[in-house]
Amino acid sequence: MADTGMRLSTGMKVFLGIDVILVATFLVLLVVGLGGSDDEKPQANESASSVGQVAPEPSADAVEADPVSFTLPSGNIACDMTVDGVTCSIASAGFAPTAECSDAQEQVFVVDATGVSEPCAESPDRSAANAGAELEYGSVEMVGAYTCTSATDGVTCVGESGEGFRLARSAFVKVP
């Protein structure tokens, strides 16, 4: 009988050891899953259309403070984001410009603390070295109170109030 008690005690120790390892693994996975990482982005096979979408609420640790520049995968739209606002440009638009710009300028699309505007600006250097990272379709970029969502039908950029714009090859539309 003493031998059986010893095996049961050893078996219990093994069971408890495995149980502790499983619980610890679960807790680590839970913390990692809830915390996420800064470079996690929705995949392109998730909703790639911005029509009717509301930008996700940025969490305090997910919002970047450093300026960010990106281009859409098509290479046609490029944006620069700072804590002060978002400025986007389009290389080839299928709509008439709303501002008359000089040859050294181009029309840009801006959302900032004053609202949405479509001014002329010096043509930015959009060479590969300065174009910024590619923002995959279905991905979101956040800087300060500004959020831009890349989609197959363009980019939607909004401020904290929800005011902003959607820019696509086919149109520029202000959003409430």
Image (tube, rainbow, N blue to C red):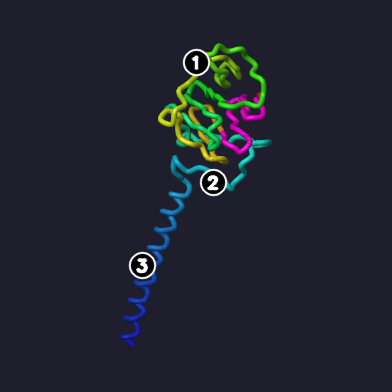
The magenta stretch is 149-173
Observer-side mark, 2 or 3, equals: 2
> How far apart in space, not on screen, are marks 2 and 1 (Cα)?
34 Å
Q: Nearer the viewer, mark 3 or mark 1?
A: 1
State the residue in front, 167 or 142: 167
| Label placed on residue 112 | none
Q: Are marks 3 and 1 in contact (CB under 8 Å)?
A: no
Q: Quadrant of residue 2?
A: bottom left
Q: Please tell me whether mark 2 sits on a helix, a strand or a loop.
A: loop
The residue located at (53%, 15%) in the rendering is 105
Q: Residues within 10 Å of mark 2 (few under 14, many from 20)?
A: few
Question: Residue 39 in the image: x percent, y percent?
Answer: 45, 41
- Classify residue 17 by image quadrant: bottom left
Of the two numbered discs 2 and 1 on the same chain, state the one appearing first in sequence.
2
Question: Which residue is label 2 attached to?
Answer: 43
Q: Which mark is residue 17?
A: 3
Viewer-side label of 2, 1: 1
Which percent across, then down, holds residue 94? 65, 27
Q: Which residue is mark 1?
A: 122
Task: Tell me residue 49's x, y (percent).
Answer: 64, 39
Q: Is residue 141 left or right of residue 8?
A: right
Quadrant placement of the C terminus: top right
